[in-house]
Amino acid sequence: MSTPGGDLRVFGPQQFPILCRRAVDDRPGLELQDAAAAVSRSPGLEAPAEHRSYYDRSAPGRRPVDGVDAVAVVTPGPALAGGLAKWLLFDQGTAVRKALESLGGRLL
């Protein structure tokens, strides 16, 4: 199952190969098994019109972490993946990493 934004959820014990636009750990993709994946990207002109202004990334204090242009996260559920991906785009600190770990997620 995929959302309009491209976040996806795979159900069940079978592994499904997922191809990524950018390599993950020097691999062209990953395999998901009973998990969800989400990606958040820094603002860009290539963003589809329906994604612009979904959340205001230009507000004071809401700049992506320097050098981070995209974040991919795998978690047990899609809402967690989407929320953690957005959080990690703007904050790579201890709190978000603890949340990621405690919720059974991993940063790609």
Image: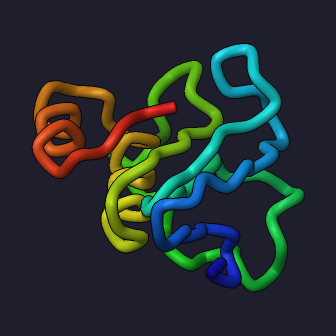
Residue 29 position, x and y percent, is 74, 37
Q: Horizontal placement of 55 versus 87: left or right?
A: right
Compared with 82, 21 (above or below) is: above
Residue beneath the point at 55% across and 68% down: 10
Residue 40 position, x and y percent, is 57, 53
Residue beneath the point at 81% across and 46% down: 19
Quarter of the image that includes the N terminus: bottom right
Compared with 4, 23 (above or below) is: above
The image quadrant of residue 31 is: top right
Q: Horizontal placement of 73 versus 101: left or right?
A: right
Residue 71 position, x and y percent, is 54, 40
The image quadrant of residue 34 is: bottom left
Compared with 98, 83 (above or below) is: below
Residue beneath the point at 66% across and 38% down: 30
Q: Can residue 91 be seen in this view?
A: yes
Residue 72 position, x and y percent, is 55, 43
Going by the picture, which residue comes out furthest to the top?
A: 26
Residue beneath the point at 43% across and 54% down: 86
